[in-house]
Image (spheres, rainbow, N blue to C red):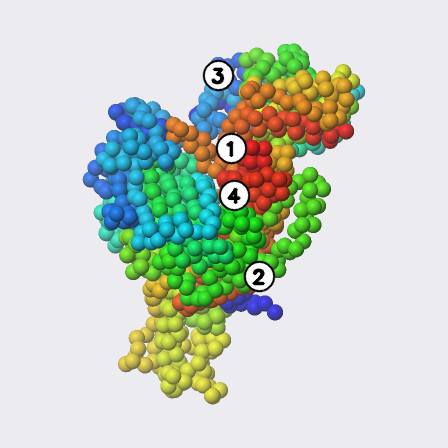
């Protein structure tokens, strides 16, 4: 790890100001960034920790939506998002206890790892990502592997999840890292069914529109018979071929629909 | 009623108190006054010519002490190889120089190019980053079969090819085996891969070199399984330091699994640099470095043929194996695919004709050497897989086919040069059948199928050769070392005693089990006995721990030394009681005259030895301390029968182990709890190999599985609750304890039954699957099911 300065502001405004320094980076739970810095693959001049900002922490339930502060840990979401059981359950199965007690929802979404769980939950739920500057719909937020709509220095202060009528997340573990080899989040909302897939695509999290259309007809696993995603756009690596990942998308979507009921 | 002390009891492991409370003393816990730190600049290309190394900018960084490159090592030797193989034409293997720091070329990702010594580890790393190395890339040699084709790029330009050796065994049987296979009623052929593994002990390697300038004494602290071997190899062959000026200390070591047997260049570097810089030099491997610098294991590509007669008797086995050596020969690398592998190809069966061909190949990868089981898992895996395939092809029960061909009379001389002293393969198979409830399998399969899962059952036997080894035999086979073991037993005046053993514990539990043996022999409490190991300045020359040898060889040395102690103590007791030596009996720590009520206590005798006021000084010396060296007459041959039941999710290919059952014959057992633990650990590593672990290089020689993000270690929830038994006991006939060794059994015995079980499950879905290569990842199993 190279030398860097460290700041821990107590308000969003102070954090935004601190991030104006050249090569400064925001630090959530550090589950990706600190490991990258230890490998000397990232060298920020300054880390601006968001962990001291009280207004960015906590889970609240307001009229059909669950709102989560950007600096809220996965463990806190697992414990506090009971109004949206599929989301709480997903948060409770991220990584291991150490990861869940350090990692934050804002950090995960801002990083947009192609195998992370939260992007699937946010995209399937039609969540709104709230920043210090604006509100961004999930459909506009994710822009490919490790790429988001966030501007430099922009901070995710919170995320608002409309609570769907039914939802479920199915994750098939990559055996080594235990990230999602493929993860599928299905949410049935008043505006229709949304299916978001993580872990599988070269383009990062994506919505499987064919499946959504079929499920809008009949919300049952049987409605997915014969549907498949295009294997060519899938990730192929030592843990799973393109064809295998494409196959898993179908299997897990069916399972998620069946479990969501 | 189980025993509560002595041989056969299961006292809790005394060393665990310090391990579990954070009070272990590992090499990285040692810090010396004035210590500097080294960071090694390692190659990030697999194969290339070094055009230049510019260290000027690095040397100018404040806090940098000195920077080394290969030119600083021109006067010292390379890292030696401890075993020479003679090929099937009578020629010695090709043995390239193995430099401390890369000379002229780099040959694998991770090879050390330069070393920076600095005031802190961070400064050393900063400086290493600004060393400018100009390397012209060369095509990497990764695939073994391509590597031995004419015209392949060469890993070592000064060798004739990438072939280290072409070994045939037993060469004289080659034609007879060919003929037997040609004339057989049935031949089953199987091609398979024994996957390359990375050991990943919990504690990465660490070494500290120290030099006492006034005395001219060197000390190396290192994470080794055999400090005396390191002292000999490094002192005599690399640095030219005589043993009396070189001390090697291996304190608590956090797991070895074979990968800490070998003498590594980092050890020689730190020892050398400590003198050159006149201050202690410490290196602590990062986990990332461990992946690309610890010797890897396995990595065989094999074709095996099993020939049977019309009555299903095995008549011949023929194998053709390519074994990866990596870029250089690690300490015992050449012995693993040959003598530790070929000699086990008879397995538990009376196959009369066996021929093994092994081509050892240099590639641009990390050196490959022994890993838990070392050669024997590779032998068992191919044999037990091909037998299973043969049973399927012939439509016979795989257990019955094995039983029909079992060796039943002992001693048994195999056609592959070893003689099994004892064993009872039907007994362990009987025990397995009793434990496994094979009769209930169909019902369990039906239950699984009701839940949408496939269920499979696999069995296998295994045999291993442990207690390595008779020195004269291994000398004939090319070992450049003896393989005896040593022990000194030092009895103190008040009756307590210390054993200095050449065995080395890196998790095995010697500090608990060894005292149980002496407590049983003398009849004193185990708490009076202390075990010392891991320091060449206190322990007599010993060969260390690997090959499940500690109790069978090191324990036997300790028994021999203790027998000498008891003999002398009896003489002292006889004098004290004015009796004849021959009439003295020792029981429960008391010496008595046979047939009388006259006795003296153990403590009276030990005190007399050191306060010899009333003592037969004219006949025996005062003091009570004895040393013994024990060289075994033969290997030991643990064996067993294993079963595995798996469920396979046909939708995803995910394998879940439902049951793992092991019935082992380890001969006599000193501490059943520790034996359970050894088997459990071995099973975890065997299941890890079968389902999860796989070291992967790409075609350019880049290590793709270079961290835990991609190298899958088994976790607790990947493993079942094991069912293990070691009540079948045919004691070893040639060591005083009748013990055989248990450290590697689980890792040897489990992979075939896991794979047999998965293949069995896939067949139950109507698929004619004959084999799936390890690790049986969900992707591979799904492809086998849908191929």
Query: Which quadrant, please, contains the N terminus of chain B?
Result: bottom right
Q: Nearer the viewer, mark 3 or mark 4?
A: 4
| Chain designation of label 3 | A
Residue B768 visible here: yes
Q: CA distance from mark 1 to mark 3?
A: 27 Å
Label 2 sits on residue: B430
Name the mark on residue B709.
1
Q: Residues within 10 Å of mark 4 (few under 14, many from 20)?
A: many
Name the mark on residue A23.
3
Residue nearest the viewer, comparing B498 with B632: B632
Q: Nearer the viewer, mark 1 or mark 2?
A: 2
Is label 3 on the same chain as label 4?
Answer: no
Cβ atoms under marks 4 and 1 closer than 8 Å: no
Is label 1 on the same chain as label 2?
Answer: yes
Q: CA distance from mark 4 to mark 1?
A: 18 Å
| Chain designation of label 1 | B
Q: CA distance from mark 3 to mark 4?
A: 46 Å
| Chain designation of label 4 | B
Residue sticking out furthest to the left:
B75
Cβ atoms under marks 1 and 3 closer than 8 Å: no
Identify the mark nearer the N-term, 4 or 1.
4
Label 4 sits on residue: B690
In percent of width and height, residue B371 lies at 42, 47
């Amino acid at each position: 790890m190279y030398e860097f300065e460290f700041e821990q502001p107590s308000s969003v405004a102070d954090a935004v100001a601190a991030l104006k320094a050249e090569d400064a980076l925001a630090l959530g739970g550090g589950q990706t960034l600190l490991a990258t810095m230890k490998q000397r693959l990232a060298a920020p001049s300054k880390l601006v920790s968001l962990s001291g900002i009280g207004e960015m922490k906590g889970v609240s339930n307001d009229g059909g939506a669950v709102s989560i502060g950007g600096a809220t840990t996965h463990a806190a979401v697992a414990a506090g998002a009971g109004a949206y059981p599929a989301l709480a359950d997903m948060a409770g199965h991220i990584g291991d206890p150490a990861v869940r007690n350090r990692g934050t929802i804002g950090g995960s979404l801002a990083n947009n790892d192609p195998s992370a769980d939260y992007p699937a939950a946010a995209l399937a739920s039609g969540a709104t990502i709230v920043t210090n500057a604006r509100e961004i719909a999930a459909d506009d937020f994710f822009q490919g592997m490790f790429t988001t709509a966030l501007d430099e220095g922009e901070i995710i202060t919170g995320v608002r999840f409309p609570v769907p009528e039914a939802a479920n997340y199915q994750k098939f573990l990559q055996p080594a890292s235990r990230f999602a080899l493929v993860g599928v989040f299905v949410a049935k909302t008043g505006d229709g069914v949304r299916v978001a897939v993580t872990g599988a695509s070269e383009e990062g999290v994506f919505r499987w529109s064919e499946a959504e259309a079929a499920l809008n007809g009949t919300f049952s696993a049987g409605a997915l018979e014969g549907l498949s995603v295009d294997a060519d756009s899938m990730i192929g690596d030592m843990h799973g071929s393109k064809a295998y990942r494409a196959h898993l998308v179908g299997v897990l979507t069916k399972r998620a629909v069946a479990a969501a009921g | 009623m189980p025993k509560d002390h002595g041989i056969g009891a299961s006292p809790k492991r005394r060393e665990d108190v310090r391990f579990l409370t954070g009070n272990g003393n590992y090499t990285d816990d040692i810090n010396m006054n004035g210590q500097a730190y080294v960071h090694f600049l390692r190659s990030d290309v697999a194969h290339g010519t070094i055009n230049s190394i510019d260290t000027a900018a690095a040397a100018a960084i404040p806090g940098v002490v000195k920077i080394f490159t290969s030119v600083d090592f021109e006067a010292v030797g390379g890292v030696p190889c401890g075993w020479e193989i003679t090929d099937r034409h009578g020629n010695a293997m090709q043995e390239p120089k193995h430099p401390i720091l890369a000379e002229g070329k780099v040959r694998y990702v991770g090879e050390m190019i330069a070393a920076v010594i600095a005031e802190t580890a961070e400064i050393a790393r900063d400086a290493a980053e600004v060393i400018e190395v100009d390397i012209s890339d060369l095509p990497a040699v990764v695939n073994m079969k391509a590597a031995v084709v004419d015209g392949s790029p060469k890993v070592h330009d000064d060798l004739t090819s990438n072939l280290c050796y072409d070994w045939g065994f037993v060469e004289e049987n080659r034609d007879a085996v060919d003929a037997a296979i040609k004339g057989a009623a049935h031949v089953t052929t199987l091609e398979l891969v024994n996957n390359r593994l990375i050991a990943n002990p919990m504690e990465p390697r660490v070494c500290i070199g120290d030099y006492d300038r006034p005395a001219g004494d060197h000390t190396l602290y290192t994470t080794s399984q055999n400090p005396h071997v390191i002292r000999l190899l490094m002192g005599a062959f690399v640095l030219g330091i005589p043993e009396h000026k070189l001390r090697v200390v291996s304190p608590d070591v956090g797991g070895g699994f074979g990968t800490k047997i070998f003498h590594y260049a980092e050890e020689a570097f730190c020892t050398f640099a400590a003198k050159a810089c006149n201050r202690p030099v410490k290196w602590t491997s990062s986990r990332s470095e461990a992946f690309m610098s610890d010797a890897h294991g396995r990595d065989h590509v094999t074709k095996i043929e099993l020939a049977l007669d019309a009555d299903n008797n095995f008549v011949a086995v023929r194998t053709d194996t390519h074994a990866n050596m990596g870029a250089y020969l690690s300490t015992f690398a050449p012995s693993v695919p040959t003598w530790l592998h070929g000699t086990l190809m008879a397995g538990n069966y009376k196959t009369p004709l066996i021929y093994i061909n092994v081509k050892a190949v240099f590639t641009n990868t990390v050196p490959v050497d022994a890993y838990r089981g070392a050669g024997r898992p590779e032998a068992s895996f191919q044999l037990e897989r091909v037998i299973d395939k043969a049973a399927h092809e012939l439509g016979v029960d795989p257990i019955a086919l094995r039983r029909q061909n079992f060796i039943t009379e002992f001693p048994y001389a195999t056609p592959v040069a070893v003689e099994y002293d004892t064993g009872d393969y039907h007994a362990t198979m009987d025990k397995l059948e009793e434990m496994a409830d094979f009769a209930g399998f169909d019902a369990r399969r039906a239950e699984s199928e009701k839940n949408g899962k496939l269920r499979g059952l696999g069995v296998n036997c295994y045999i291993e050769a442990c207690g390595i080894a008779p020195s004269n035999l291994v000398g004939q086979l090319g070992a450049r070392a003896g393989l005896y073991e040593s022990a000194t037993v030092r009895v103190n005046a008040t009756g307590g005693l210390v054993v200095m053993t050449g065995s080395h514990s890196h998790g095995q539990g010697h500090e608990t089990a060894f005292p149980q043996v002496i407590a049983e022999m003398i009849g004193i409490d185990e708490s009076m006995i202390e075990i010392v190991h891991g320091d060449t300045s206190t322990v007599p020359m010993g060969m260390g721990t690997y090959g499940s040898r500690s109790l069978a060889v090191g324990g036997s040395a300790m028994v021999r030394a203790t027998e000498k102690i008891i003999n002398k103590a009896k003489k002292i007791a006889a004098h004290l009681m004015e009796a004849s030596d021959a009439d003295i009996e020792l029981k429960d720590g008391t010496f008595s005259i046979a047939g009388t009520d006259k006795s003296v206590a153990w403590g009276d005798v030990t005190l007399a030895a050191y306060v010899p006021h009333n003592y037969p000084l004219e006949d025996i010396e005062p003091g009570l301390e004895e040393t013994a060296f024990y060289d075994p007459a033969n290997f030991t041959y643990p064996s067993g029968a294993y079963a595995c039941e798996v469920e396979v999710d046909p939708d995803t290919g995910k394998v879940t182990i439902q049951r793992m059952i092991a019935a082992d014959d380890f001969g006599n057992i000193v501490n059943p709890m520790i034996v359970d633990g050894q088997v459990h650990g071995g099973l975890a590593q065997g299941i890890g190999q079968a389902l999860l672990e796989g070291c992967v290089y790409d075609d350019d020689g880049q290590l793709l599985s270079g961290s835990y993000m991609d190298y899958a270690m088994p976790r607790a929830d990947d493993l079942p609750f094991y069912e293990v038994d070691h009540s079948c006991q045919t004691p070893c006939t040639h060591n005083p304890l009748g013990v055989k060794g248990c450290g590697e059994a689980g890792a040897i015995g489990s992979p075939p039954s896991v794979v047999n079980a998965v293949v069995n499950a896939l067949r139950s879905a109507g698929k004619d699957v004959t084999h799936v290569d390890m690790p049986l990842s969900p992707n591979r199993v799904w492809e086998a099911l849908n191929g």
